[in-house]
Image: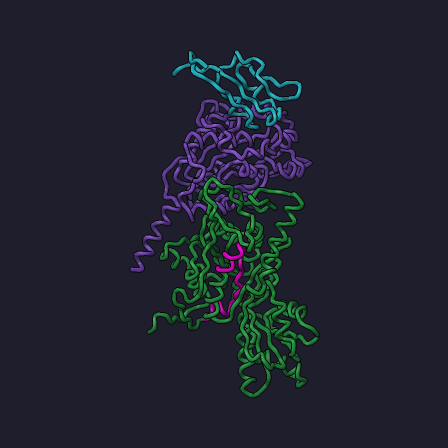
Amino acid sequence: MNPKIHFLQGNEACVEAALYAGVQFYAGYPITPSTEIAEHMAYRLPQKGGKFIQMEDEIASICAIIGASLTGHKVMTATSGPGFSLMQEGLGYAIMAEIPCVIVNVQRGGPSTGLPTGPSQGDIYQARWGTHGDHAIIALTASNHQDIFEITVQAFNMAETYRTPVILLFDEVIGHMRERLIMPEEGEIPVVDRLRTSVKAGVDYHPYLPREDGRLPMSDFGGEHRYNVTGLFHDMWGFPSDNPAVVHGLLRHLVDKIRNNVQAITRYKEYHLEDAQTILISYGCSARSALHVVQNRRARGERLGLLELQSLWPFPYSLVEEKCAEARHIVVVEMNMGQVVRAVKRAVYNPERVVLANRIDGSFITPTDIKNILRLIQGKGV
Amino acid sequence: MAKLKLKAHHIDRDWCKGCGICVRFCPKHVLQLDDREKAYAAHPEKCIGCRLCEMRCPDLSITVETEEEGEKS
Amino acid sequence: MASVKEYIRERFFPHIWCPGCGHGTVLKSLITAVDQLGLSKNDIVMVSGIGCSSRIAGYVDFHTLHTLHGRALAFATGVKLSKPQLRVMVPMGDGDALAIGGNHFIHAARRNIAMTAIVMNNRIYGMTGGQFSPLSGYGKAATTAPYGNIDHDFDVVQLAKAAGASFVARTTTYHAPQMVEILKQAFTHKGFAVVEILTQCPTYFGRKNKMGEAPDMLEWFKENTTPIGSQAKQKNPSLIERGVFVAEEKAEYCTEYEKVVERAMKGRE
């Protein structure tokens, strides 16, 4: 047997990828359907000299990883629905204090306790706007285990590059499904390490003064530079400030550092888009069914294509607009009442071309569900 | 141990908020508040260098400088 | 001792606390304890939450993390476990530590992770203007208890003991020399240390409850507290005991986790 080939759950693939990316600290609280991430971390992390801790709740979990990130470690937590709601407070803190960290949300049906073991993609806007106040966020997703691996490594890379929390929006289907993963070789996927300051001890260090390229080199807690970290608006030393110029400058910085890098952050896959008259747009588990339909119809000569989004926030408006310019119909396939479809409608000209193919009953959306919508669009009835 | 003797009370008037804790609990009634409600050593000669004022001052504005008895300043 | 100015961020003084607020005395005692122990500023991380108490972190020249209301111990747990060689101090208010942060408090104590939790107990929410806290006590007055408080308080020391803290002590701002000694013991304790410090809020708790000015409130601490196991306590059980209630050796979390790593790595061979 090839030792590089594994047969595992998506949740386990996520853990292996985090280890590949250099995760050193994990704090979490059990919750379906993300629990296997905690279980696998508890087993694997100490094997690599890392630390795993089971906290008293999800609030404490995200706080603990922020603390561990400040001592110079790559950190992660994972949760689902209700736990993700509890993490919003800490998420906002990590945004404000610019703490690199990765938060996995293996989505389940909501609101509230909802459907613990049923799949859903209902947290797209919670990932974007769940924490209070103006801010920008990065949220990534994937539809198969090979891509979970790749995108998890990218999540760590982006967290370090932009000094920000990055959300991985997986779902119950890909989290629990078992399939093949070919473990990438070391170096096959680039890994971004933490950027540390070159300012020497005794020289004034500004933890919150961006360089010309927008990046902020860090200094580990316990190191030579003693500074302050706060969730309040703060000056370049990290001390609280309500000076209007400071407040304005910091908020712009927090938003612009993501917004100005949409292209660099955008991740997607495309299938048969070149001449597609009907374009399916999907992500996560739904994209599996969408891809099945596209391949099936292409084999019959129908001009169908798939745009699979792997970065949902910042939303790749220009990409969607460009890819859909010539399409007659745009069908957004997702497992919610219509979340990404809203962003797609904002992105394209003639948004009346955009329709939603969804399923919201806690069952996985099937190719048949999508085909039924296509029949309706094509005037064939169901 | 040699007996401690007061050298000086250093009171930061900008930091002192005039709460009166040092005045109330000085065992020798050395300190008082002036007309601007700032602490000052009204009777430094009575000071025994116990530093309770320094330890309790919530404004961190008092430093009691002492020397051992017999030492020359 | 070295000048207090060696340990503070002088440009932020005078501090924001009200005249007579006990938090400044806690700051002073903490600095004195650090100085007497000869600790290095680079080795200390102070993690605070939200409220009047949390502002203490802004004033000390350590690594400082000013976090969310009630969550200081959770952040501190991440700091400590990820870098156990650091000394972690977590000053919190009574509402911060024991209302919104009560669960984190219990579980940090239960894990016995080496850090010092300092509960600056002034029995009121000061930053928001004088609402009752879980430690205000039955019958006390506060802006959210205009007809008298019907919430009962609890004993922080008993709670910390029951939750498994391996060092538990109590003192007051009146007893500043004792505070320094207790903090020194707490800072060097190998486990979770809880130090409850009764401190005065003359602006809200004092005024609302007609306890007089700051010196009068210190007088109250003097009159109503007694060393643990004193004869006075036997005669007057309503006196609040001061001193070290628990100081025991117990498996510490970070040390235990090192053993987990060892076992995990052995399994790999």
The shade of chain B is: cyan
- Looking at the rendering, which quadrant does residue A13 occupy? bottom left
Q: Estimate the x, y position of residue C213 in percent, counting from the top left.
A: 63, 25
For the N terminus of chain A, which image quadrant? bottom left
What scheme was used to colour the molecule?
by chain
Q: Is residue A74 above or below residue C15?
A: below
Q: Is residue A306 above or below residue C33?
A: below
- Residue visible at 62% across and 28% down? C19
Q: Nearer the viewer, residue C111 or C88?
A: C88
Q: Is residue A101 magenta?
A: no
Magenta residue span: A156-177
Q: Is residue A164 magenta?
A: yes
Chain assigned purple: C
- Residue visible at 60% across and 81% down? A276
Q: Nearer the viewer, residue A47 or A9?
A: A47
For the C terminus of chain A, which image quadrant? bottom right
- Looking at the rendering, which quadrant does residue C181 occupy? top left
Q: Nearer the viewer, residue A362 or A42?
A: A42
Q: Is residue A45 above or below residue C14?
A: below
Q: Estimate the x, y position of residue A275 in percent, counting from the top left.
A: 60, 82
Left or right of A152 on screen, residue A343: right
Left or right of C84 on screen, residue C14: right
Residue C107 visible at all: no
Q: Estimate the x, y position of residue C266 in percent, counting from the top left.
A: 30, 56
Q: Nearer the viewer, residue C220 or A223?
A: A223
- Looking at the rendering, which quadrant does residue B13 occupy? top right
Q: Estimate the x, y position of residue C7 in percent, counting from the top left.
A: 49, 33
Chain assigned green: A
Residue A186 visible at all: yes
